[in-house]
Amino acid sequence: MGLPWIGRLLLFMQLVHGVFCWGKYGHYAVCKIAEGHLSEDAMGTVKKLLPNWAKGELASVCSWPDDIKWNYNWHWTSSLHYVGTPNFKCNYKYYRDCYDSAGHKNKCVTGAIFNYTKQLFSAYQGYNPRLKYNLTEALMFLAHYMADVHQPLHVGFTGDLGGTGIKVGWYRRKTNLHHVWDTMIIDTAVKTFYGSDLSSMIQAIQRNITDAWSQDKSSWEYCIHDNTVCPNLYASESVRLACKFAYRNATPGTTLQDDYFLSRLPVVEKRLAQGGIRLAKVLNQLFSFQVKIGRSSR
Ligand SMILES: *[C@@H]1O[C@H](CO)[C@@H](O)[C@H](O)[C@H]1NC(C)=O
Ligand SMILES: *[C@@H]1O[C@H](CO)[C@@H](O)[C@H](O)[C@H]1NC(C)=O
Ligand SMILES: *[C@@H]1O[C@H](CO)[C@@H](O)[C@H](O)[C@H]1NC(C)=O
Ligand SMILES: [Zn+2]
């Protein structure tokens, strides 16, 4: 009778798992990179907010929103991992695109980033911190969705479900284009170039941030009108990258190999870097004691 139910459940979870998120590696990498750029104030508050099982490590909770989204009580969060854009338009607009499948406004990845940033802002930078929200959850959601919005196919076309509907081969395996970008490119890179050690890959990205990309870092941190966070900008970048790199030469039935892998890996590594730097910037601003003092004179 095939697999026992637990085996089937695990298989099912594995199948659905990759469907709408950077894999565990991607989320871990973004949060690790962010940890390396947190201020002392921010690190202190993050550690206070983290649940016990995190053992003081932000990166260890960054896949939590993926782990819970199949739970009935959390099912409403499943649309918060992505935003669909009109087919072949290669652009993104908040008011046009940020809906869930039932048409509820703001229920998408950019809406969620605004939402959880606002909750943390009102608690840590507001005048009247009304603690009606669970700020531990707000932090874990924010850290997760900041990474998701940087995965180009999380801002992909509605018609193919962000590449999930595009069946492709990845070397000898059968998969879909979305999963290639969530997981396969990173997994293959870790195996091929980093001796199967994710932390070596993270270190290589971190070296680039302090070296080759050090000039770009402040432009990544820039937000229009001095806003704390600007998810609309990150989503616009993502859909452009989806068109330029993810969808290109990846029509249904294609087998993707070295050409695709080697030319797309640098895009993925840069998105992980940008996600991490921007997450750190948001948390540093939210949890800075300075800002609060500055603002109270307004
Ligand atoms: C904002 O967060 C709260 C608490 O998790 C949730 O109840 C609400 O539905 C969220 N709204 C959006 C647009 O994500
Ligand atoms: C906040 O959320 C976390 C994760 O869901 C949970 O473990 C914790 O008990 C919640 N705290 C409160 C005060 O409800
Ligand atoms: C480091 O930056 C260079 C130049 O942009 C790029 O070619 C390379 O792929 C990057 N490596 C990593 C690990 O990010
Ligand atoms: Zn996700």
Image (cartoon, rainbow, N blue to C red):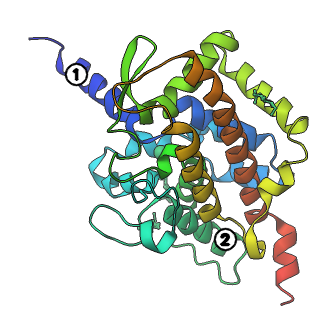
Q: Quadrant of the C terminus?
A: bottom right
At x 58%, y 69%, the residue is: 119
Q: Is residue 239 above or below residue 100?
A: above
Q: Nearer the viewer, residue 202 or 284?
A: 202
Mark with earlier residue (2, 1): 1
Asked if one can make out residue 31 in the rendered structure from this viewpoint, the answer is no
Query: Residue reaching furthest bottom?
Result: 298
Residue on which disc 2 sits: 121
At x 79%, y 57%, the residue is: 221
Mark 2: few/some/many CA within 10 Å (<14, 14-19, 20+): some
Q: Is residue 193 above or below residue 199?
A: above
Q: Where residue 259 sits in the image (x, y, percent)?
A: 58, 20
Residue 82 - label: none
Instruction: Identify the amino acid type marked 1.
Output: Arg
Residue on which disc 1 sits: 8
Asked if one can make out residue 102 in the rendered structure from this viewpoint, the answer is yes
Q: Are marks 2 and 1 in contact (CB under 8 Å)?
A: no
Residue 66 found in image quarter: top left
Mark 1: few/some/many CA within 10 Å (<14, 14-19, 20+): few
At x 86%, y 55%, the residue is: 218
Q: Quadrant of the N terminus?
A: top left
Q: Where residue 174 sits in the image (x, y, percent)?
A: 35, 19
Q: CA distance from mark 2 to mark 1?
A: 42 Å
Q: Is residue 3 above or below residue 269?
A: above
Instruction: Identify the amino acid type marked 2.
Output: Phe
Query: Residue reaching furthest left?
Result: 1
Say which element carries label 1. Answer: helix
Q: Under 8 Å from ligand 1: the CB of mark 2?
A: no
Q: Where residue 149 sits in the image (x, y, percent)?
A: 56, 51
